[in-house]
Image (spheres, rainbow, N blue to C red):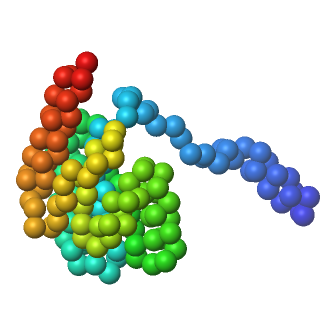
Amino acid sequence: MLKYVLTLTALALLLAPAPTLAGTVPVEGEGDPALYVVKVHADWCGSCTALVPILEEVQVGVADHPVLFVQLDVTDSTLTSQARLLAAALDVEDHFKANNKTGLVLLINAQDHTLLETVTKQNSASEIVGKIKTHLAAQTKQDESAE
């Protein structure tokens, strides 16, 4: 009987489908971001919570533009350390240190890393989308005139 159970178990293991591994997803598009939208966030910050639906709407509004949304989380010392490293990797660490208040959203030129504007929960999603598109248009004009 034991031999029969072991045989069935072994057979079941052999015939069982292989475990599903992570799949691939198509990654469309190419190029670098023209603008960073950097949110300084903490879980305990009410303004940060209020910004979540606003920034989700903003992301939809600029989905076809080269805009990178980044969250620098300062909820605790470990996350703050990681946020500083991410800011350094994006070359925006000086702006992060100078604007280290939670609930701020920094609009930063991704090419020259200049701080273009700071927005908060007081700005509507459509207002922020308008500001982003205005900054992108100005960058495009500047790039065209440089050529």
- Rendered-image quadrant of the N terminus: bottom right
Quadrant of residue 38 in the image? Answer: bottom left
Pick the front one: 17 or 141: 141
Q: Position of residue 130 (x, y in %)?
A: 9, 46
Horizontal arrangement in the rendering, residue 94 relative to residue 144 (left or right): right
Identify the residue at image location x=53%, y=41%: 23
Pick the front one: 67 or 138: 138
Instruction: Decide: is 120 above or below 43.
Output: above
Pick the front one: 127 or 60: 127
Identify the residue at image location x=74%, y=50%: 12
Instruction: Decide: is 9 above or below 60.
Output: below
Horizontal arrangement in the rendering, residue 54 relative to residue 91 (left or right): left
Identify the residue at image location x=34%, y=74%: 42
Q: Position of residue 147 (x, y in %)?
A: 25, 18
Identify the residue at image location x=28%, y=44%: 109
Q: Would residue 41 be visible to someone looking at this image?
A: no
Q: Position of residue 45 (x, y in %)?
A: 28, 78
Pick the front one: 106 or 71: 106
Quadrant of residue 70 in the image? Answer: bottom left
Q: Position of residue 115 (x, y in %)?
A: 26, 52
